[in-house]
Image: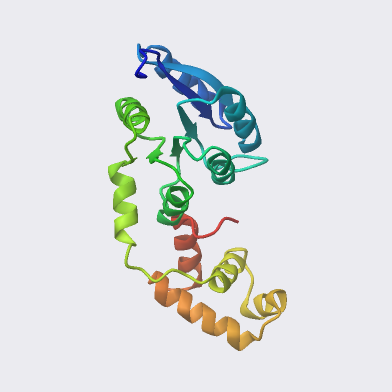
Amino acid sequence: MNADGSRIEVLSVDDHPVVRGGVAGLIGIQPDMMLVGEASDGREAIQKFRTLRPDVTLMDLQMPEMNGLDALIAIRSEFPDAKVIVLTTYSGDVQIIRALKAGAQAYLLKSTLHKELLDTIRAVHAGKKTLSPEVSYQVAEHAADDSLTPAEVSVLRLIARGNANKQIADLLSVTEETVKSRVKCILSKLDANDRTHAAMIGLRRGIFEL
């Protein structure tokens, strides 16, 4: 609840109507909260935020038109005090760190219990940052890892799309030896057994999207 006794105003952003419906039902029965708006993609989220100026925004990451991370960056650049909770199915540590660097105050998985979501909304509204235990574990697990360079991420993305080294070399306008060297670094940094394993790790951790 706000200092003046008014309820915490929440904007829900998700491209799945079922998720938005669940959030609406949950918030609707809380005496200290009210859902003031919904959006189904990043662009709509920015427009709704400008109009409604909610206390807390729940933001999905994977959405059509404009993803949640880009929407978060746009909202925070225009409204630096915006309080955003990322609510997603993705637990990859790279995605989490990107969202936190972009200004998210919390990162929750959609599988979390309703009570955890409500407690997080109240905590973020009060100015606290919060991560669910699973998310904290993901970040901590890879905290000491060497991150991939942009060039290595480009190679990994092309591996995941089924390209052989020669095709990757042609696509990136580099030599095949350069690609082999980058693949070797990728396998080492990700502690992967082979190219396919590296691609799976990259997708799971949110290092790249297909």
Q: Quadrant of the C terminus?
A: bottom right
Residue 56 image position (x, y, % from top left): 45, 29
Residue at the spot x=40%, y=15% of the render? Answer: 7
Q: How many dots with numbers?
A: 0
Q: Position of residue 64 (x, y in %)?
A: 64, 40
Residue extending farthest front: 4
Frontmost residue, 8 versus 43: 8
Left or right side of 120 for 79: right
Instruction: From the viewer's perspective, tell me whether residue 140 is left or right of residue 91.
Output: left
Q: Position of residue 166 (x, y in %)?
A: 66, 81
Residue visible at 32% across and 37% down in the picture: 128
Q: Would you place residue 112 above or below residue 93 in this image?
A: above
On screen, residue 94 above or below 150: above
Q: Quadrant of residue 141?
A: bottom left
Which residue: 68% across, 40% down? 65
Q: From the viewer's perspective, is residue 172 above or below residue 132?
A: below
In the image, 74: left or right of 191? right
Relative to 164, say whether 102 is above or below: above
Q: Quadrant of the N terminus?
A: top left
Is 89 or 140 nearer to us in this picture?
Answer: 140
Tell me, yes or no, if residue 192 can be seen here: no
Residue 119 visible in rendering: yes
